[in-house]
Image (cartoon, rainbow, N blue to C red):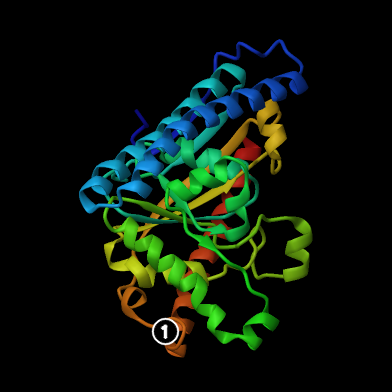
Amino acid sequence: MPPAGGAWSKLWGTYMLGFLPPFVRGVLCFLVLTVNTLFWCLLLFILALCKAVLPLPAVLARLDPLINRIASAWTRCNSLWMRFAHRFDWKVEGVDSLRYNDWYLVSCNHQSWVDIFVLQEALNGRIPVLKFFLKAELIYVPVIGLAWWALDFPFMKRHSRADLRKNPNLRNDDRDAARRACAKFAKTPTSVMNFVEGTRFTAEKHAVQAPPYQHLLKPKAGAMAMALNAMGSQFHSMVDATIAYPDGIPTFWQYLCGQSTRAVLKVRQVDIPQEFCSGDYENDRVLRKSFHRWLDAIWQQKDADLVAMLGAARRA
């Protein structure tokens, strides 16, 4: 159990593969991850086929929870095999009051593909399975793209400004996709995940954007506003997650090799103003400005938290 302060430190692993060179460990971990993914995806595809053949409300009400349990099982298995391969010192704070049978909007800073594994390990079993807003092109990723489709992840198209000027109706594509997905989410407790920066943080991107934050890129409000407009009144709260890597931002390969062991995750729940759930973000300029101020305040706090988290971890 976590200590009274709501924070806990997790030192993973029996480190049974510690005698192997990092490259060999990385290869073995990648192979196990692949096998684990293929196994659970096969079960997922069978249930997804049943959904496609029998799209009846009574059938979907039984299948959707099973599909979500398969996704949770995939996450648990990833945690198990990684404990045998590596030791990870992950400190997590603020997850004690979360409830599994509820709806959440989840927001997090984005630095690496490792973010997803940290979030899944910390939140799995505490809130429903994370459902991500994804780029439409990702549906073509072998195996996992179909898995995301089976899990009803919303696939969003990205249109250039030139395309939008030529055809303003393209703006409705993402909104309609979000509403279709959120209509499904409303039937079963769900966590809608959004990396608000829209891309992974790098020093180069930070220099180009020149944002008013030391460790973050500028937040993009569109996807979050669409999710709130579609089902905001159903969300219990927004789970605002902040991830810091005291030893530097790891690549996915470094994670597999066990070459980046420390991470700090701070979670806090943020109340969602009711006007953001019922208002018209696209056409109400006053509401849009208010939403941006609200999101900027969250981002300012997140940036301050990152400074404190990195400083404390590096002094430890």
Question: Seen from this angle, which residue lies furthest left?
Answer: 58
Name the image quarter holding the C terminus.
top right
> Which quarter of the figure has residue 250?
top right
Tell me: residue 15, above or below residue 23.
Answer: above
- Look at the numbered disc 1 and give the secondary structure of its residue: helix
- The amino acid on which the numbered mark 1 sits, given as a three-letter code, is Leu
State left or right for residue 182 relative to residue 144: left
Identify which residue is drawn at 77% across, 17% down.
21
Residue toward you, 112 or 66 = 66
Residue 89 locus on image (x, y percent): 57, 29
**Neighbourhood count class around disc 1 (C-alpha, 10 Å): few under 14, some 14–19, many 20 upward:** some
Q: Would you name the residue on which mark 1 appears? A: 287
Q: Is residue 96 left or right of residue 116?
A: left
Q: Where's the N terminus, which quadrant?
A: top left
Can you tell which quarter of the image residue 19 is in? top right
Establish if 162 lies above or below 37: below
Task: Determine the residue located farthest toward the front in the rendered image.
Answer: 53
Q: Quadrant of residue 211?
A: bottom right
Which residue lies at the image location 38% right of the left edge and 69% below the top edge? 228
Comparing 101 with 53, the one in front is 53
Can you see residue 26?
yes
Q: Residue at x 58, y 50 (%)?
A: 308
| Place of residue 81 in the rendered image (x, y in percent of width and height, measured from the top left) | 54, 21
Q: Residue at x 25, y 52 (%)?
A: 56
| Residue 190 percent across, percent down from the top left | 34, 51
Residue 263: image location, x then y, percent: 58, 38
What is the total number of numbered labels drawn onto the structure image? 1
Can the viewer see residue 5?
Answer: no
Above or below: residue 202 compared with residue 50: below
